[in-house]
Each structure stands twice: as structure tokens, then as C-alpha cells.
Amino acid sequence: MKACFCVADPSLPAGRQGVRKLISAYNAQVKRAIAFVVFGFAVLAIVRGALLHPDTSLVSEVSGAPQDIPSATPATDTSLSATSTAYEWYPVVQVVDGDTVVADIDGKRTTIRLIGLDTPETVDPRKPVQCFGKEASAKAKQILSGSSIRLETDPSQDTYDKYGRTLAFVFLKDGTLFNKYMIAEGYGHEYTYNLPYKYQTEFKAAEKAAREGKKGLWAPDVCMSGAEQRRPNADDGRTGTHIPSSGTYECAKNVYNCSSFTSQSEAQSVFESCGGAASDVHKLDSDGDRRVCESLP
């Protein structure tokens, strides 16, 4: 039997102390591995964010290209609101009365008759100055003189009346619909000629509120000569014939409109006498509810 002379490896720890050293070394390696994995995820997150949200400012700084690309549209007048610059605006050159104005449109004087509004008469040589007509005219001049307006036509209405006046709604630069304003403040009343127009419901509601609030011409004792003179006598340039006091009505052709009557009951009587809804020759029932000229008192 040969004797074996073995020399222990000095790099290998012995006993319990050696085991502890091995465990400590293993833990250190695990921590380094975990730190490496965390670092790797952090790098991946940074790269992913750069790909999804590139920093264009770096490109701009390198290339000298502007960051903001100017619009190809012409610059607008910053003194006007964004809403007002989107439309054509026409300077008012004359205020005829509460419901008629003259504007400069492309260098031409154009007379505009406001749709849906009728104010008391002041300038018609065939008629006396009506109650509250001067006040309505003065208010229109106060608001419109020296201003610019936007026009809106209505395809349900004629383009011109028989006098050649353009039929339109008038808007102010602050967005106010002037036709409606005059009704709401009691300077005139809602007026429908045959067919309903775009803002008819709003105008009727405005007149109702003005009546109930006793504004303007609807105020007590403003017009002492009675309801007939208080109510503006509508004339938008489309012929209306006043009914005879005898009660003999023309039912064969269209000769009346709501301005021909002094009250709703009078208009209703003519409507029913001429056949009602089955034969509305005068086009008085504009909304088809069998109740005509509802803006009349």
C-alpha cells in the first residue's frame, strides 16, 4: 500500500467559515446580476421613449429649421374677434328707420329690409308717423350708424322685395342679431310674410317676452290712441290689401297678408271664411297649425 501525501488547495475555504464565505460570494453575484437586469430595463425604457416621442428641438437646432411652420392663409386683423373675421362686413352708410338700412356692398349702396321685424312707420309719405316710430328709428341709428354689419339671407324668403330692397338678417360684430334685438326691446314686432323664416320661433318668443315685460311700444300709456296704432303696420314691399270693414272678403286670389289685419281674431275670421286650411289662398297659416297671424294682438 502506497502512502498518499495530499496538499489542500489553499483557495478553497475549510469548515463553517468557508461555507459562510461561499454564501456571501454567491449573494454578491446575485445582487450584481439583479442590478444588471434593472439597468438593462432602464436603458430599454429610455430607448423606447425616445422612439415614441422624438425630441424635434434637437433636429431644429442642428438643421436651423423653424419649429413652428407658418400658415399659408393670410393674416387676419387681430383687432377683430376670431368670429367676426370669418365673415364679410359692410359699412352702414344710412339708417332709414328701425327696420331698413343702407350699406356699402362692394362700392354700391344697397338698401336692406330686415326679415322678421316691423317697426312703426316714420318715413312713408303715404302714412302718418306711427307711435314709437321715432324711438325705434333713433335706436337703430344709435346702434348702426358708423358701424359695419354682416348679412344673412334666408332661402325660404324672397331675395328682394318689390322695391328692390335686399331681404336679410343683420348681425353686429359682437354677434347680436339686430332684428331680434329690436323686437326683444319693444321697438318693433315680429312679422311673418307668408312662409316661416329661419329665426321665426326666436322672434316670436322675443315679442312675447317684450309684451309681457311691457317694454318699449308695449309699455302702458305709451301710445294713447289704442292698440291699432300701437301695432306697427308691416310693409316689407310685398303687397298687402287691408280688408274692407263690411266683412266682404276676397277669397279668389291672394290679396291679404298679416299686415292687412288689426288683430289675430280678424285674420282668423278671414282665414276661416275663405275655406280655412283646405284653401289657404292668402297663405296666412304659415306654420300649418290652423291658427293664423299669431304675432297680432
Image (cartoon, rainbow, N blue to C red):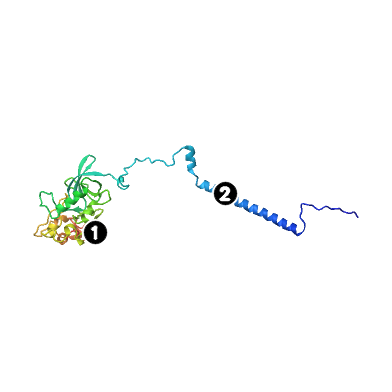
Pick the front one: 21 or 213: 21
User: Gap in Å between the C-alphas at discs 2 and 1?
Assistant: 66 Å
The residue depicted at 60 percent of the width and 50 percent of the height is 39
- Give the residue type at disc 2: Leu
Residue 252: x %, y % from top left:
14, 55
Residue 78: x %, y % from top left:
32, 44
* Residue matched to label 1: 205
Choose mark 2 or mark 1, whichever is in front.
2
Q: Quadrant of residue 229?
A: bottom left
* Residue matched to label 2: 44
Task: Count neighbours of disc 2 (C-alpha within 10 A) and say few if under 14, some if 14 to 19, many if 20 or more.
Answer: few
The residue depicted at 21 percent of the width and 48 percent of the height is 144
Q: Is residue 211 left or right of residue 24?
A: left
Residue 151: x %, y % from top left:
25, 47
Q: Is residue 54 left or right of residue 237?
A: right
Quadrant, the C terminus: bottom left
The residue depicted at 48 percent of the width and 39 percent of the height is 61
Q: Is residue 25 left or right of residue 255?
A: right
Residue 61 visible to an observer of this rendering: yes
Pick the front one: 202 or 6: 6
Q: How many marks?
A: 2
Pick the front one: 108 or 266: 108
Residue 193 visible to an observer of this rendering: no
Q: Earlier in the sequence, mark 2 or mark 1?
A: 2
- Give the residue type at disc 1: Ala
Pick the front one: 114 or 258: 114
Circle 2: element type: helix
Task: Count neighbours of disc 1 (C-alpha within 10 A) and say few if under 14, some if 14 to 19, many if 20 or more.
Answer: some
Residue 5: x %, y % from top left:
86, 53
Circle 1: element type: helix
